[in-house]
Amino acid sequence: MPATILPIHHKWHHAVNSQDKLDAVLKATKTATRKSPYSIDSIEADIIYSYAKQQAVMGHPPASDGDLTLYSFLQQLDQAHFQCPHFSIEAASQYSTNRIVKLDFKCMAAFQASIAHVQSYLKNMPRRFHHLVWVNADILPGPGEDQDNDKAQLNLTPKFNAAQFLRAVATELPGTTLSIGWTTALFDTRAKYTSEMVQEMMVVLKPYKHLNVTFPIRATSFRNSWDVLQPLYTNGWTVTLWWSLDVLTRQEVDWIYHALEEGKENFRNRTYYDLVGFDEYFVFSSPDVEESEVEGRDV
């Protein structure tokens, strides 16, 4: 491992929302042998509420049910020691693990039905690892729909009360990382975030400045919004760029990488990249990674 694990070192397994996908990730992380230290396997998974099962399940809207409950998902991560090393908690407290599990809740009902399960999962790991469990929700309206279409605007209405969600995470899941963002839609995938959106987020977060926070930002909107997004990099907070529908152009990723990792010092090493194809981009772009190290990476 490098002396310091940076956000850019995380390789994201996106939308791990089924038993098959979870099996594949656990198998890959158990058997993979990498010569490169620059790959920390992390998971992003979505949670919806199943009215049929009357519990939280893994899935992404418009799905209304799934084959994998959140309870089972967390149990399997625990049994596989995905985030906590395979020895006693006392010994593990002296060990540095870095895998992140990002739980992306799609509605308040799913979140409320999940709190007890997440609490149980956290009890099985030392507190120093709790920040590696991310609790994600889109709590404010964001970019991406036709401003003149009332029906389209409904897609941007958050499924959460921002203050209620923040208070619940702070009190029920202390020590975890708040991953809080804005709703987005596909009418215009390059629609800008606005200064008003950022300011609204700063206001609702004011009572929680002491917490670990990362802001998920749609990568296709990042370049057009960069000027107004810079205040998010205050208070020791981070940003997580996400996009999974297709691979961004090399030119666009070059621009993002230069702005964040080669530009001003206060932006460096503060961004996670949950982007399709970024693992390959990083391997072949980083001056610190030798070509021979690419062997064994499951890119």
Image: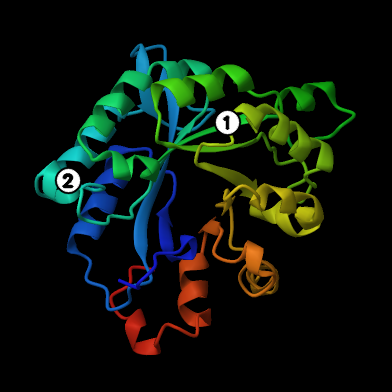
Give coordinates of residue 215: x percent, y percent: 60, 44
Q: Residue at x 81, y 56 (%)?
A: 227
Q: Residues within 10 Å of mark 2 (few under 14, many from 20)?
A: some
Q: Residue furthest left?
A: 87
Which label number is shown at residue 168?
A: none
Q: Residue furthest right?
A: 148
Vertical placement of residue 211 versus 132, above or below: above
Q: CA distance from mark 2 to mark 1?
A: 33 Å
Q: What's the coloring here?
A: rainbow
Give coordinates of residue 21: x percent, y percent: 32, 46
Q: Which residue is mark 1?
A: 208
Q: Earlier in the sequence, mark 2 or mark 1?
A: 2
Give coordinates of residue 97: x percent, y percent: 28, 55
Quarter of the figure with the C terminus: bottom left
Q: Nearer the viewer, mark 2 or mark 1?
A: 1
Amino acid type, label 1? Tyr
Relative to 251, is 75 on the left or the right?
left
Question: Dot 1: what SS?
Answer: helix
The quadrant where residue 266 appears? bottom right
Amino acid type, label 2? Ala
Q: Residue at x 51, y 18 (%)?
A: 108
Vertical placement of residue 17 versus 66, above or below: below
The quadrant where residue 283 appears? bottom left
Quarter of the figure with the N terminus: bottom left
Which label number is shown at residue 80?
A: 2
Determine if residue 144 is in view: no
Compare residues 156 and 213 and report the one nearer the observer. Answer: 213
Q: Residue at x 37, y 21 (%)?
A: 115
Relative to 132, is 85 on the left or the right?
left
Q: Residues within 10 Å of mark 1 (few under 14, many from 20)?
A: some
In contact (CB < 8 Å): disc 2 and disc 1: no
Give coordinates of residue 185: x percent, y percent: 70, 37
